[in-house]
Amino acid sequence: MEGGVVLLDFWPSMFGMRVRIALAEKEIKYEYIEQDLRNKSDLLLQMNPVHKKIPVLVHNGKPICESLVQVQYIDEVWKNQAPLLPADPYKRATARFWADFVDKKMYDSGSRVWKTKGEEQEAAKKEFIGNLKLLEGELGDNLYFGGDGFGYVDVALVPFYCWFYAYEQCGNFSIEAECPKLIAWAKRCMQKESVAKSLADPEKVYGFLLQLKKAYGIE
């Protein structure tokens, strides 16, 4: 079953990191092919002709697109190793709800923190922290979002942790001061090898973000 697993990805992508974590949790060997998003490869365009985006998971020559779909696919195909989604239908639905919340809220509000200035940036920071506080409330006093075990929502959210430093530098604020339980959870996740080896270095991400700001003409 492990034959022919390929990941088309870009190193700072929090969406690609989700898939890397899931593959590491399942101990699946795969070929990693770094993509240049300014000059998209024929392989990427062939494997994801609809969105033309990374990450793309290719299994036995067949492409699976969209990171949360990929994580669910990995969990279903390699179901006997380190399950990510809970077995209970209600808990499963709840996990999917919060992963969808991360998808719809975190990237956009985080992007606005570094793309804007002044009052617009203050509003973006308020929204970003507000989203994190909702997630922190869902986490409660649990070790992980699924309870005692690392799971689907953790995989969906934890890649954003390596972007927090960049957001803080651009927005001049402290996420830990606002959401200490969430940062404690992220540090707990980082103790897992699957997470630690999949997430990019925060300072390297910040350097990449500075390049992006320059490219967008944001100073």
Image (cartoon, grey):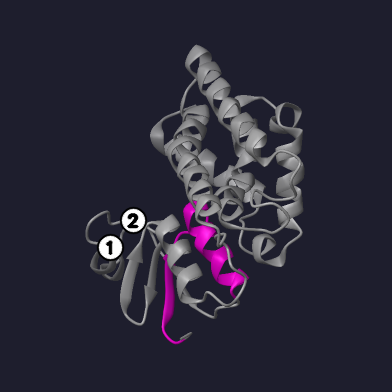
| Residue located at (43% from left, 67% from top) | 73
Name the residue beneath numbered marker 2.
53
User: Total number of numbered labels?
Assistant: 2
Residue 185 in the image: state x and y as whole percent.
Answer: 73, 46
Can the viewer see residue 156 in this picture? yes
Can the viewer see residue 13 in this picture? no
Q: Amino acid at mark 2?
A: Lys
Element under disc 1: loop
Q: Amino acid at mark 1?
A: Asn
Q: Is residue 2 above or below residue 20?
A: below
Q: Is residue 193 above or below residue 15?
A: below
Of residues 152 and 60, which is closer to you in this image? Answer: 152
Mark 1 and 2 residues: CB-CB less than 8 Å, in contact? Answer: yes
- On screen, residue 119 versus residue 143, left or right, reads left
Of residues 71 and 211, which is closer to you in this image? Answer: 71
11 within the magenta span: yes
Q: Earlier in the sequence, mark 1 or mark 2?
A: 1
Residue 207 in the image: state x and y as whole percent.
Answer: 58, 45
Element under disc 2: loop
Magenta-colored span: 3-26
- The local crowd at label 1, few if under 14, some if 14 to 19, many if 20 or more residues have their Cα within 10 Å, is some
Name the residue beneath numbered marker 1.
48
Residue 186 in the image: state x and y as whole percent.
Answer: 70, 47
Residue 53 in the image: state x and y as whole percent.
Answer: 33, 56
Most extreme residue toward the top is: 119
Image mark for residue 23: none
- The local crowd at label 2, few if under 14, some if 14 to 19, many if 20 or more residues have their Cα within 10 Å, is some
| Residue located at (52% from left, 41% from top) | 209
